[in-house]
Image: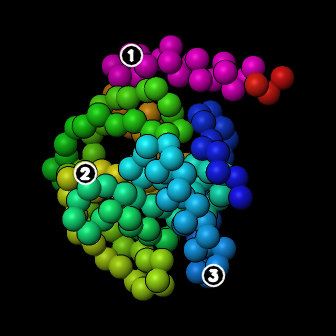
Amino acid sequence: MNTQVRIYPDPVLRRVADSVENIDESIKKLIATMFEVMKLEGGVGLAAPQIGVNKRVIVISIDEKGFERFALINPVIDFFSDRKSKMEEGCLSVPGIRADVKRPSKIVVSGVGRSGRQISLETGGLLARVIQHEVDHLNGVLFIDRISEKEKKRIFEDLNMLINRANSSVR
C-alpha cells in the first residue's frame, strides 16, 4: 500500500471517495496504515484519498479525551451549527501553507467505527474542525477552497510553487 501523502495539485485529492461496503481486513489494514502515516507526518487527521486510496475513511488523533486514535468509515455530517469560528488550518497535502478558515463551531457526525458499530457524535472545538476538514477531503474539497479571497491572494505564490513542483516532476 502506498504510504506517501499525495500533494496538491494531485488529481486524487479532487475526487469524491467511494463508500466502504464491507469492513474487512483490507479496511482495517488501511486504517492502521493511515494512523502510521499521520503520526510519521505529524498530522492530527488524515483521509484515505490523501494516501491515494479512494475510500471514505478518516482517522484522527488529537489530545481531546477519548479521541487519541479515532477512525470513522463513511462519515456523514448530519448537522452544522449556525455559529462559525475562524481558525488557522494547514494540511499534509498542502505542505507549508496555512490559512484562516471559517467553519461551523459544532457538528453532529455519524458513521461506522472500525469495530463495525454505528457511531453518532455531537462535538465542537478542534475535533469538530478536524472532522470537517477530513470529510471535505472525502468530497474532493481542500481547505484552500474554503478560504477568503484575501487569504487566497496571500498564499497564491506558495500554491503556484506546489503546482510548478508537481509539473516539473511529471516531466
Q: Tell me the element at label 1.
A: helix
Counting residues from the N terminus, which is met first, the one under dot 2 or under dot 3? Answer: 3
Q: CA distance from mark 1 to mark 3?
A: 44 Å
Query: Of helix, strand and loop, which mostly describes the magenta segment?
Result: helix
Q: Tell me the element at label 2.
A: helix
Q: Residues within 10 Å of mark 3 (few under 14, many from 20)?
A: few
Q: Which mark is residue 66?
A: none
User: As shown in the figure, which amino acid type bears the numbered disc 2?
Assistant: Leu
Q: Residues within 10 Å of mark 1 (few under 14, many from 20)?
A: few
Q: Residue at x 23, y 59 (%)?
A: 64
Vertical placement of residue 120 versus 155, above or below? below
Counting residues from the N terminus, which is met first, the one under dot 1 or under dot 3? Answer: 3
Where does label 2 land, which residue? Answer: 126
Rendering quarter of residue 97: top left
Name the quadrant of the N terminus.
Answer: bottom right
35 sits left or right of 151 in the view? right
Where does label 3 land, which residue? Answer: 24
Q: Tell me the element at label 3.
A: loop
Vertical placement of residue 146 versus 21, above or below? above
108 sits left or right of 32 in the view? left
Q: Position of residue 52 (x, y in %)?
A: 66, 51
